[in-house]
Image (spheres, rainbow, N blue to C red):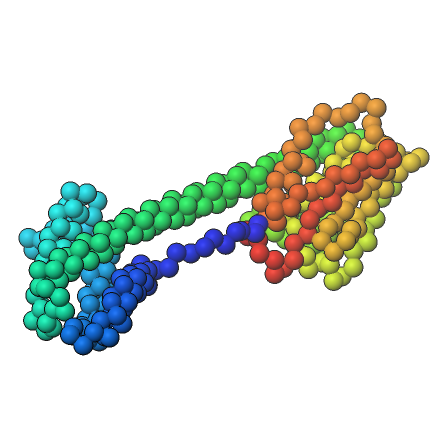
């Protein structure tokens, strides 16, 4: 079944670097405007190195606070212990980290450059800039954490849905074999009372058929060629009971035999036709198996419904439809007119993106 390829969130390291660069640009733009304005004033010394250092501070502060606030694992270094799941610890560490960086960076900057305005005003503007940046970084960090959490939940849900689908498919596969075995034993039971030699022949053919059943039960898909070979053996079982009353006509070119479909699909459709229609010597039941279009296999028969409809559980077609939906995302197509009944099964290309 084709799956929707969801948008992947970049790695945490890449996200930190890109976000820090973006914040550096955002906080540098006002300073750049001031820098260009003050360059025209000969009484104020505001050089390019001062401007670049402030940008570097912005980048470092963003990286450090993003690392702290996006941390998801517990950190323990001696007496230093940090639990990112504790809101109390996060608040404390953010405040302490802010005070340390603010003091260190401010003193470092003043030791390198003379402030282009009164020192008290410069300190105030420097602190305000730091506060705004740290608050914005913490807000962005929490937004990213929500995205990470949402992505993990979505991936977990996808894993659970896939596991659930695979489990349901296993149940469907397990229904096929007992259903076929039950019907086969009913046929043997009927033949024993009619013709013992036919019953023996039927059992021999059934042995060959069940060899395929057991082998294919381990696979989700088989080639159309394998399914047609199996159908030949299954047809021999039917001839043991019906003789010339039943005619199977196939029209499938060799190029199409590489296509894939669920195992036992043809057996289910042929069995369904035989079960619900009159099979007589005067008017044999013809079952046609052919390709319809490039990606469908159709099994059809002329309607000759029994006067007394047989008891049906509906397992066969329902099971086949669910398996086709799981494997290809396409349903079987049932067509019924006044004179004809047909079922089309989607065929899967060998290189098609499916669940298998």
Residue 203 x %, y %: 70, 41
Residue 119 x %, y %: 8, 64
Q: Quadrant of residue 37?
A: bottom left
Q: Residue furthest right?
A: 282
Q: Is residue 304 above or below residue 14?
A: above
Residue found at x 61% / y 61%: 351
Residue 281 x %, y %: 90, 36
Q: Is residue 186 above or below residue 255?
A: above
Q: Nearer the viewer, residue 6 or 140?
A: 140
Q: Is residue 126 left or right of residue 234?
A: left
Q: Is residue 164 left or right of residue 235?
A: left
Residue found at x 10% / y 72%: 114
Q: How many labels, in total?
A: 0
Q: Is residue 19 left or right of residue 190?
A: left
Residue found at x 61% / y 49%: 328
For the question of whether residue 206 can be seen, the reply is no
Residue 2 x %, y %: 57, 52
Q: Nearer the viewer, residue 103 or 355?
A: 103
Q: Is residue 52 above or below residue 324?
A: below
Q: Nearer the viewer, residue 89 or 33?
A: 33
């Amino acid at each position: 079944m084709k799956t929707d390829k969801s948008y992947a969130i970049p790695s945490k390291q890449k996200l930190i670097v890109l976000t820090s660069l973006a914040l550096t640009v955002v906080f540098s733009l006002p300073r750049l405007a001031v820098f260009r304005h003050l360059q025209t004033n000969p009484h104020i010394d505001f050089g390019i190195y001062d401007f670049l250092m402030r940008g570097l501070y912005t980048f470092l502060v963003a990286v450090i606070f993003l690392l702290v606030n996006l941390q998801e694992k517990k950190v323990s270094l001696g007496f230093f212990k940090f639990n990112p799941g504790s809101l109390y610890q996060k608040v404390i560490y953010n405040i302490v980290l802010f005070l340390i960086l603010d003091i260190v960076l401010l003193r470092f900057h003043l030791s390198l450059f003379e402030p282009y305005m009164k020192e008290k005003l410069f300190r105030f503007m420097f602190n305000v800039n730091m506060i705004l940046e740290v608050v914005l970084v913490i807000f962005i960090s929490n937004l990213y954490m929500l995205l990470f959490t949402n992505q993990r939940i979505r991936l977990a849900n996808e894993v659970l849905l896939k596991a659930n689908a695979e489990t349901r498919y296993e149940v469907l596969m397990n229904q096929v074999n007992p259903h076929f075995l039950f019907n086969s034993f009913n046929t043997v039971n009927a033949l024993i009372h009619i013709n013992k030699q036919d019953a023996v022949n039927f059992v021999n053919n059934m042995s060959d058929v069940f060899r395929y059943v057991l082998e294919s039960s381990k696979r989700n898909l088989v080639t159309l060629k394998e399914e047609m070979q199996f159908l030949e053996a299954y047809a021999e079982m039917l001839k043991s009971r019906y003789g010339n009353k039943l005619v199977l006509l196939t029209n499938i070119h060799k190029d199409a035999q590489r296509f894939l479909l669920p195992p036992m699909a043809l057996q289910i459709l042929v069995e369904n036709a035989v079960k619900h229609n009159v099979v007589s010597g005067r008017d044999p039941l013809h079952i046609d198996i052919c390709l319809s279009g490039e990606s469908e296999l159709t099994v059809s028969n002329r309607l000759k419904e029994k006067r007394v409809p047989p008891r049906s559980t509906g397992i066969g077609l329902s099971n086949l439809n669910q398996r086709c939906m799981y494997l290809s995302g396409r349903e079987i197509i049932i067509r019924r007119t006044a004179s004809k009944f047909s079922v089309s099964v989607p065929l899967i290309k060998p290189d098609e993106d499916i669940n298998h």
